[in-house]
Image (tube, coloured by chain):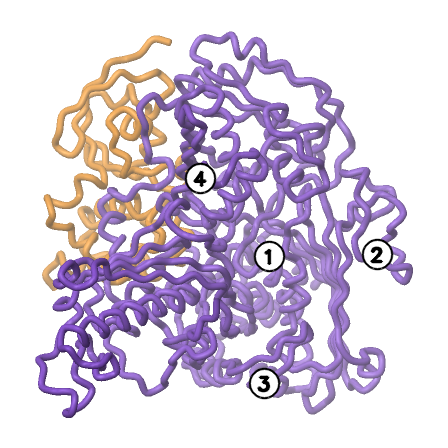
Amino acid sequence: MAHDILENSGFAADRKLNIVGTSPIKHDGWDKVTGAAKFSSDLILPGMLVGKILRSPHPHAVIKSIDTSEAEKLAGVKAVVTGADFPKIKEGTPYGDMTRMVMAQEKVYHEGHPVAAVAATSEAVAKKALKLIKVDYEVLPHVIDPVAAMQPDAPILHSYMRTKGATPNDPKVSADRPSNIVERYELGVGDVDAAFKEADVIVERTFDTKPMHQGYIEPQSCVATCSEEGEIELWCCTQAPFVYRDRLSEILKVDGSKIKVQQSELGGGFGGKTAFYAEPVAIQLARKARRPVKITFTRSEVFRGTGPVSGTQSRIKIGCKKDGTITAAEAELIFQTGPYSGSAFTNAPQAMFTRYDLKNVRTVSYEVVSNRPKVASFRAPCVPQVVFGVEGIMSELANKIGMDQIDFRRKNAMADGAKTIYAETFGKIGFIETLEAAKACDHYLSPVPKGQGRGISTGFWFNRGGETSSTLNVAPDGSVTITIGTADVAGSRISISMMVAEELGIPVDKVRAVLADTHQLGFNRVTAGSRTTFSQGVVLVDCARKVIKEMAGRAARIWNVPEEGVEFSNGSFRPAGANVGEFQPLTIADIAKKTTSTEGAIAARSDMNVTGAGPGFGCHIVDVAVDEETGAVEIKRYTVVEDAGKAIHPLQVEGQFQGGAVQGIGWALNEEYIFGEDGKMQNPGFLDYRMPVASDVPNIDTVIVEVPNPRHPFGLRGVGEVPVVPTMAAIANAIGNCIGVRPQSLPMSPPRMLQWIKERDAAK
Amino acid sequence: MKKHHITLNVNGDEYDALVEPQQSLLDVLRDKLMLTGTKEGCATGDCGACSVIVDGVLQCACLMLGVEAQGVHVETIEGMAQGSDLHPLQKAFLEFNGLQCGICTPGVLVAAKALLERNPDPTETEVRYWLAGNLCRCTGYDKLIQSVLIAAKEMRGA
């Protein structure tokens, strides 16, 4: 179906806005400040059982046998499942791998990999039953470090795996032997070797980063029920209810029409709740026990069982002329993905240099399996890790040629119409405006305080659209319900309601957004990639326009004039001109009141694969102080400058900027998975996996740049991903300017800082 | 497993419950009394999502055994508003967007209330250190801290 709004959004820079751009209280806020909001673990059903999962103590082993007979005999145990209770799907296929990640079959691939589960009348009984399950393992050698996993003599996870994209020109990969390298991906443009010869200065460095966790405060929890007729209902915290349904249908071999997924309030996701873990297990237990089953992860299970981001190693080289023009860039990137593919690593070579208008680029990227929990998405998946390197080299080059940090980036900045190395041609973009705003902000204009170091970095994210299906219903009193199938990860319901209210010319309090279950709407893509407020804005403004058209028709028939004789403005329908006749304007509520006496329900739906997302760009400025005795880094001042296109709800936009930056501060300074020689995670709790607390960080200043995206009715771009992209690079650059050594490894935690300071002093 | 009978007062109401020896006050509140406003983020006292006030003292409900709660007075998020009249902290969090996903919010609000009862005029640094036991992954703390300072000012009538 053609959708005019995708080609002609109706965006007008001079449109007078009454609601968009203000910051009303979010409607779901009341329940959240009173404790009434229902998060995933808050649902209690009659007859509900407690499900618990038995996890592998080994990072890599063959499961020789599992004996569940003693557990099944324990009083209070109502069901036990193992990998044998899931439909057999070939390993090495997307659904075969997915089902094995949820519950191991032939082998376990990481410490914490589920091997069996029980449902019992109490948690104490369930835990006791887990201890009665006997698993006979044949322990295999394991490998976690991605560079080690690429070596020809590394333990092989999957004997069937052959590297996709292998080429005889690259000795690291071979299509002829088993390998842990899932894929080799090459992306580039121009003549890089010739272009490096034109450079006056070339910097080449190697960087590495460790896996970090999304760190949502709400552990995964779900409740599954199954009717006698085999209809499944699933309540869970998810960023992707429709994707869960479709994947459940595939791995459980149940019709999608018999699976209802209802999202709970979501207690943080950041990409980590785009894939299911306990949900299929709870369903299989519920089907077997014929009773509702709830599984709630402990924090240790969240760390050991759900996806941290990719650890990486990258070698990056950039050359420029004395006047600041970058002539060429090159990168070799390695991404650690856990037991199966899924890192979305191709984002990295596409995004790492994008914002600079480069004509000669060569990148080679590898995705590598290893014996750690499977990777899950996190804000701008795989991009911040490599921007950490790119922006370090950018700062070094600027220093070498004696150019201001922002001027150097401005000199190479992409402008409207720029073409990316992945063959997209940008429309209207705001990178230059973002850099100009950064250069003009108070932070950048202030001198660096004595004893501190300042760093800057920039970042880019594509922003996304995608499949979105929503409905809008007008009640006879003129109030409006919108039913949405995307997840609300941080307050999108209010922003979406605001756009609907603006379009209809009614107060935002007259609009209520409802989170739909999967029976109510068509397919909605995962809430990720900063797509939701953008896509829902397009789809629901389309719904609002359909409703306005419908109501205009009813006004025309009430007045007995032609439809084109009715116009809509400021929430009222009026005669389009004096020749139409004299009629009192009719408001939305006036016509809604006549719902039954005219033609019945006033409603609209819109189902689209939304296009036209506007790229997002940001620039971060940070001042740090380093305690050279302890190695501790203190963030003294931080400013986020980012193009939002249009800030629908400015307080929420600022919150995205601030939250992203502080997650990046954690990634920069502390957060990492620490594995022992035995392949077990040594810090699976918040005490030892230390995320930033309130006293670790200053206020985060924000500058919202607004270069409208003309493909959206109100000009918006996404704002969720970019705020974490530049953070670690900016902090590392600041540390470099403070201690004289720019770190090339994350996290920049006190023991490592002390080591670098020691090495610096030894080199003097 | 032998269960223990306890009686306790939560938000002014008397409750009794049969608790297993290993169950925490958090388990009692959520699973026995169905007061699910208090959240579990870690069950090891590291995240503060289960912050409650027990006999006037702020603590993590996950670090107190249910059997220890015999005879205590507990204040939870459910008791913070007086009917439909929100506490100034709750109002400030709504108005200044002190919350995003909302999972840490009950614990943060209870902890902030305990702070303002001891210190009605805290500095920003004091608020940051007092709330250092409450993890929030969404907000970056900025608007959360500002909301507490605004509520404190409001409560002082300043």
Give the amino acid at mark 4.
Answer: Pro
Q: Colour of chain B?
A: orange
Left or right? Give the position of A301 relative to B127.
Answer: right
Of marks 2 and 4, the one in the foreground: 2
Q: What is the secondary structure assignment of the residue under circle 1? A: loop
Residue at the spot x=89%, y=57% of the render? A171
Q: Which mark is residue B154?
A: none
| Residue on which disc 3 sits | A417
Give the amino acid at mark 2.
Answer: Ala
Looking at the image, is mark 1 or mark 2 earlier in the sequence?
2
Q: Colour of chain A?
A: purple
Residue at the spot x=14%, y=66% of the render? A589
Q: Could you confirm whether marks 1 and 3 are on the same chain?
A: yes
Q: Residues within 10 Å of mark 2 (few under 14, many from 20)?
A: some
Above/below status of A589 relative to A239: below
Asked if residue A633 shows in the view, the reply is yes
Above/below status of A627 relative to A559: above
Quarter residue B41 falls in = top left
Left or right? Give the position of A655 relative to A624.
Answer: left
